Image: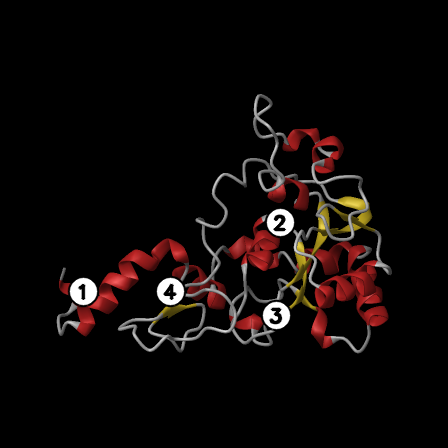
Amino acid sequence: MDLEAGRKRSGFEDIFISYHAEDDVQSTYAGGLFHNNRNYHLSPFKNNDTLVYWSSSRCLPQRNQLAKNILRLLPHHSFGKCLNNVGGLDMALSLYPECTKDPNATPQWWDHLHCAMSHYKFVLAIENTYTESYVTEKLFYALDSGSVPIYFGAPNVMDFVPPHSIIDGTKYKSMEELADYVKTVANDPVAYAEYHAWRRCGVMGNYGFTRAASLDTLPCRLCEAISRRGGRDATAF
């Protein structure tokens, strides 16, 4: 099993699990197991002054530069170690005290991840690498928090998400054009609401397949694959 980009078989596997549908068993980053205990509070209100949430603590040069290029054009809060502009990793708890999960425990930044995101209209989501079908929790966290992702990553990302739910940053000629579009959407209630229209219908379309192939369902799907390899019909059990 390898869910990281650059999926490679060792040659010794009977069954290979990866993020890609072309492998023996697919496992996506959508679903509940990547989000356990993080959705305890989501804000129904969005910040109209600071539009974009960004958080990254793995400061890869290429990703950092891309983030700088777009964030310099948009009002934002950066909460991670990379490009932090709020004063520390746990500043979200100062800005949004309702994000405190357990007042008796030492706060961990990942505990209030969804809560902090949910206060922003947009979440910048940049993958470590741009690889076909490599769509990670960075995107699904943003969708689950009730924000609109500004996404840079897999070229076939629309195969994994609800219709009209994300802004694919790679489709714009320049960062200036992208930033202008984000500002336009932010200031147009109807245009912004259209990015959330899918939520009224629940899990559907490509997103339904993505959730169905998530880590949540992997044990059963792996058992089915093993059963088929053994020459038996898994649906009979």
- Which mark lies nearer to you, 1 or 3? 3
Pinpoint residue 57: horizontal percent, then vertical percent.
67, 51
Secondary structure at badge 2 equals loop
Seen in the picture, residue 228 relative to 183 is either above or below; the reply is: below
Distance Cα–Cα, label 2 vs label 3: 25 Å
The amino acid type found where label 3 is placed reads Thr
Determine whether, in the image, residue 52 is placed left or right of residue 135.
right
Image quarter of residue 24: bottom left
Distance Cα–Cα, label 2 vs label 1: 36 Å
Q: Which mark sits nearer the N-terminus, 4 or 1?
A: 4
Q: Residue at x 54, y 76 (%)?
A: 132
The amino acid type found where label 2 is placed reads Gly
Q: Residues within 10 Å of mark 3 (few under 14, many from 20)?
A: some
- Which mark lies nearer to you, 2 or 3? 3
* CB-based contact (under 8 Å), mark 1 and mark 3: no
Q: Count the marks: how many? A: 4
Secondary structure at badge 4 equals loop
* CB-based contact (under 8 Å), mark 2 and mark 3: no
Q: Quadrant of the C terminus?
A: bottom left
**Residue pointed to by mark 1:** 235
Distance Cα–Cα, label 4 vs label 2: 30 Å
Secondary structure at badge 1 equals helix
Determine whether, in the image, residue 11 is placed left or right of residue 45.
left
**Residue pointed to by mark 4:** 1
**Residue pointed to by mark 2:** 146
Q: Nearer the viewer, residue 56 or 38?
A: 56
The amino acid type found where label 1 is placed reads Thr
**Residue pointed to by mark 3:** 129
Seen in the picture, residue 21 relative to 53 is either above or below; the reply is: below
Pinpoint residue 64: horizontal percent, then vertical percent.
75, 62
